[in-house]
Amino acid sequence: MKTVTCTAPVNIAVIKYWGKRDTSLILPTNDSLSVTLSQDILHSKTTISASETFTSDRLWLNGKEEDITKNKRMHNCFRETRALRAAFEEEERRHGREVAPLSTWKVHVCSENNFPTAAGLASSASGLAALVFTLAKLFDLSTNMSYLSRIARQGSGSACRSLFGGFVAWEMGSEADGSDSLAVQVAPESHWPDLQALICVVSDAKKGTSSTEGMQNTVKTSPLLQHRIKEVVPARMKQMKQAILDRDFETFANLTMQDSNQFHAVCLDTLPPIFYLNDTSRAIIKLVHEYNNASPDGKLRAAYTFDAGPNAVIYAPKEHMKEIIQLVAHYFPGAADGSYFADPYRILQSNEALGA
Ligand code: DP6
């Protein structure tokens, strides 16, 4: 029996992925870009054991066993990593070296999040990234992250970006087999230590429309999505990368808020429309704009972004974060269970920590 444990962080997109051109390989309709959050605050921790005595692949999520017989995405990750392991074993044997036949053994996976899964925070991204990274370690595979990101992508699209710390782009690629649809690091975690993130848990209810289902309805019915993927995102990706490299918060903040708003506009343009924001989310949007308008030097001090749910993530330079937390706590004392996850020192996590 062999056992390995790893953790992987959550990422929050500032240029959103929404729409697939191939639903089984999980190939997106546009590039996306995210910031990886510190593992101190949010992470998935996964332990995997492989043994010749196990009779089936099994998963325990937060202590409860899940039925994975029909979980195609998990099986994609098992199949791809086992194929790489089988090739590795063959190579080792060809050189006369002994190697355990792990590619033929079943695995037991135990995964837990250090944050409430029900809070609707990006748990699939960190969970699937942790699964693929732990399998790679277990099978002694290369841990080239872009390479592994192509496998994590087939577990959940956004998971491919959680293999890197820092600022990460998912390049949509153009090949039909998905070989060039992978994650690359735009800048490491050390690049912009002054940038911080605050997660406001507006509601911990499970979302009504899953991302997977919602985005394909958008692809089928929204004319605005066509405009977004052709005209808007390509230029925005270039501007966002440059803003990050320049540590230009003004541009970063404007693009982040615009992209979140366009993503939710595209949801509204879907038939039937998808509503992820609620009244509290909209009040947070208003509060951030008012806070920015009141800035003494006229510079932006905060930027919001919302994924497929009502919870807000606010990015801000360190000097303003304390005030923002006070404002949010003052105006929204009853939000969800009152939990605000603030990332006090760094928002980013190094790659090495994935293997810790
Ligand atoms: C709004 O990665 O959860 O968070 O690929 O179907 O698993 P699947 O979808 P998922 O979608 C994430 C959508 C998003 C935007 C983003 O993270 O880029």
Image (spheres, rainbow, N blue to C red):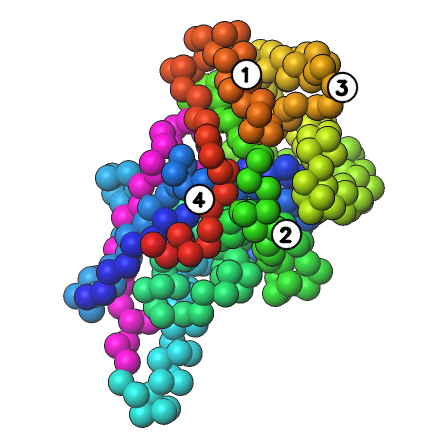
Near-viewer residue (255 or 320): 320
Q: What residue do we see at 58% from left, 35% from top?
A: 195
Q: Earlier in the sequence, mark 4 or mark 2?
A: 4
Element type at marker 4? strand
**Residue 298, label in figure:** 3
Q: Which residue has dot 1 on it?
A: 323
Q: Nearer the viewer, mark 1 or mark 4?
A: 1
Label 4 – label 2 distance at C-alpha: 17 Å
Location of residue 128 in the rendering, given as x and y in whole percent from the top left corner = 43, 49
Q: Is residue 311 visible?
A: no
Magenta span: 99-124
Of the image marks 3 and 1, the number of the one nearer the N terminus: 3
Picture quadrant of residue 120: top left
Q: Is the residue at mark 1 in contact range of ligand 1, meaning its CB lies under 8 Å from it?
A: no
The residue beneath circle 4 is 9
Numbered circle sitting on residue 186: 2
Residue 145 vs residue 63, the one in the foreground: 145
